[in-house]
Amino acid sequence: MSTCVAVTGAMVLLVAIYVGHFADMDDFGYHGVPLTSCTHDASVPGSEHPSSFFEGWYTKLVSADGSQSLAFVAGAHVRDDHDGGCAAESFLLIVTDNGVATPQRYYTSLPPTLDVTNGVVSLNETSVRVSRNSVFFDVRQSQDMPRVTGHVAAAKAGHFWPVTPLNPGAMGWFGWIPGMQCYHGIFSMSTYIDGSITIDGTEFNFDGGRLYQEKGM
Amino acid sequence: MCARGVTFRVGGGVSQIGDLVSHTRGCGCRGTILTRGKPACLLPLPTYDYCRLVFQAAGAASRKGDRRRSHALLWYVVQVPFGPTHFPGFIVGFLHDGQLHKFATYTGAQLTSIRAWSAWAEDADEECEARAVANERGLDGFIDFHVVSFTHSIHITASIPSAESWPARLHAPINGSMTPFVYEALNGKIDVVMKDASGGVVFNGSTLHSGVEIMGLAADLAFRMANQDAVSTWDVAAALTSQASWCQLLGFAACCVLLLAALVHKCKAQRHYNDGKSVGDEYDAWTQDQVLEHFWGEHIHHGYYPDGEIGYVTRMHHCCVVLDLIPTVSPSCCCDVVCVCVVCLLMVFGSRNVDFKLSKVDMNDRLLAWAGVQRGVCPTAAAPAAVCDASAVPSAAPSSSSSGIRVLDVGCGIGGSSRYLARFFGPTASVTGITLSPAQRARATEITAQAGLASQVTFEIRDALATKFPDNTFDLVWTMESGEHMPDKSAFMKEIARVLKPGGRVVMATWCTRDVTPATPFSSLERTRLERVYKEWALPFFISIQEYQRITPPFGFCDIKIGDWTRYALPTWPHSVLEGAKGIVWLLLRGPAVFFRTLRDVYAIWHMHYGYVEGTIKYGIFTARKGYPGEVVVHAAQEQSEASPVDVTSVGSSHVSSGPGVEEEESDSDSDSDSDGDSGSAIRRHATSPATALVATAM
């Protein structure tokens, strides 16, 4: 009987420890602060960027008939140099397949200009904005990247991975384990979308198409 | 949702491509993990072997199509870095008809097979089966894997065709400490087959233009996944101590204490089969701790579930609906907790179609009906079937009344079936139950006296392989899930034949394996699965129900009929766990020894259930009639090509035949359950079949 009580008590304690532990996480929030460089001002509330940081958004768009698809990753990275300094950059990768021409890929590395504000990620220099179930492109032509314009938005609510306290997203309860190298979340498994994106004069029409979106960091 | 998936309240609004979407009291996320974990990348580190596969079935994409028509698949299989070590993990999400089916390490799903190879992976030169397939089909990449969850299984095959300039090479950020690049393809072809627990195909489809990423050591990862590399406790401890705070360490220490307690208990009482005594000892223990009787009632065997489910699937579906609703309807963690509590209550106390204990009585009813045994009628009075020569039946065959009918219940447990049979055949019948467990015998006698059946039902300690009853004693031998404990199945069947009266019938239900042939031997996973079940429940080995059919005829049986009722028995194990969850307080009050022993049973139940789901373990049923002296038994040849040899056995002769005259019934996803359990899908092979070779001899 005493062992039962001890075991039950240990389990309750364990749960309490973890709940209490993660209840502190609000204090470390970084949302609302643009990531523009490695440096940060600790005196500014909410600007406590970690010295090592990565965040990337993967979005895949498929046209209604499945003949055209486009995937892109917008992300940023900051790495601690262990000598007091750090290095940072952001990047954009686009891969396309229209089922006719040779599939294309475009990649460009940029200064660290990732802006994460209330769930909207913006690569300001290239005018790429990504939020839940929507994408906006107004990318200037450059050496690595063609002119990319257009926008796509959700036509109606989509399917996403359920988030609960016990299973916080696609990683399940593994999402609660500290020390993991990467964490992934699924914004949309399948969302019906409207819109089009034009890359170097070639239009990708996604009216009635679908969107998949995930985030990793 | 964010990577950590922690929900919190937000206010204000966000401009999304020109449209203001209010997020007030909505669901937001925060990325605070950035300060404590050290995420290096979205892309994998060299140790982060990684395959991702994303497809959306374009054919299902329709503006007018509602949510139910959409399909989407997400798959990750990774070697998850964790501090100084790593462990294998996978996540499969399949959106089908508006419902998300999750197959993940953390949901208890199991990866039963995986093959992977990519021309772009770091180990592309390594010889492996997947590479051979890819080369044969002219592919740049090939991934094939099979995952089994609690309710479904899914088989996914991804093919990446060869193409110039494909796939795209995604560079990692130059300053990152991550793998320099990953290959990203959009032209993958994905084939998906999802089945339910009974093997019925729920979805079968494929799509082109699917996103596929493969990087790192793909083939090596597949190999390690297939061999179930696992993180060691020591590795976890090392990882935590290097990064965790004191409260995490405390939590980890508490986990270690619990784990240690469980391991100590496990090591102390392994239940290997040694001999009949070990079986008796185990049943003594089970009887004395009263857990089985409390949860299972007097019938300690599988139940019969007409629809292949108990409503637990339905219940789980309802719970999934609630879980899916949580992120959309709950603005706070408090609300989440309430929803989770609702789910727990639903799981344990939700609507139920089949009563756990009554399902076992139903199993008895159905099995007797399937065997053709009628209530109140002596089995030896039943007319011989077509495969036996009715003219050989002595004119002095027993009357059709139940007067004096004698029944033997082999492996009687605490006497549930014995009492059931006594009531089934009426007050003039007498039933003898035999067991190896003195505790079971004592408890069976006690319950029987309380039921007022002491004059009809008696219990004895006897070995089923050598009962020492006189020859031709019983009209019916009932063996409900005891054959699996027999170390010599032939001797067991021979003993049953010996004690049966001519014309008497044996009715058996037993745990079996699938039929194993030289062409379809057990895989290593199947062998492991069986070994675990054997060791946990004092079982020597199983054989297939077809094997029972093959070994039986020499002992004088005819009218042999076998069946596979896996589908109808399958829900028993998850149902038992649900019943256990409902009675968790009672279980805790039984003391730590009983509690941990029961937990270990859940471990065995897990393997047993997956054995059923995978098709390794079968629930076999068998019935046969003992022929009359001089009665000619005609055996059907097994195959047309083997029909030439003469194959006849005369009852009582010592001639050994290899091909029995049988009826075989198999349950499949298409067969319906009749009230008597004898479905129209039965495969029957009679003596009149063209494939049958007949020659008769008399004794």
Image (cartoon, coloured by chain):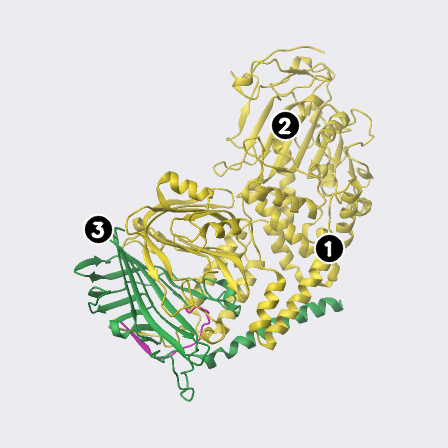
Chain colours: A green, B yellow
Instruction: Give the CA distance from mark 3 to mark 2.
Output: 62 Å
Report helix, strand or loop for mark 1.
helix
Q: Nearer the viewer, mark 3 or mark 1?
A: 3
Residue A79 visible in this rendered orientation of the protein: yes
Quarter of the image for residue B425 reads top right
Indicate yes or no whether the magenta region holds residue B9.
Answer: yes
A213 is within the stretch colored magenta: no
Q: Position of residue B624 (x, y in %)?
A: 66, 27
Of B6 and B629, nearer the camera is B6
Q: Which residues, given as a range, are shown in magenta?
A: B1-16
Secondary structure category for the residue under label 3? loop
Q: Secondary structure at mark 2?
A: helix
- Tell me which chain the residue with mark 1 is part of: B
Q: Which residue is mark 1?
A: B267
Same chain? Circles 2 and 1: yes
Q: Are marks 3 and 2 on the same chain?
A: no
For discs 3 and 2, the disc positioned in front in the rendered view: 3
- At label 3, counting other C-alpha atoms closer than 10 Å, the crowd grade (few under 14, some 14-19, many 20 or more) is few
The residue pinned by badge 2 equals B549
- Viewer-closest of B232 and B198: B232
The residue lying furthest to the left in this view is A201
Q: Assess whether mark 2 and mark 3 are in contact (beta carbons under 8 angstroms).
A: no
**Label 2 marks which chain's residue?**
B
Q: Quadrant of the C terminus of chain B?
A: top right
Q: Which residue is mark 3?
A: A101
Q: Amino acid at mark 2?
A: Gln
Q: CA distance from mark 2 to mark 1?
A: 38 Å
Location of the N terminus of chain B by quadrant is bottom left
Q: On the picture, is B224 further left or further right than B280?
A: left
Please state the horizontal and vertical placement of residue B457, each as a whole percent of the image.
Answer: 79, 38
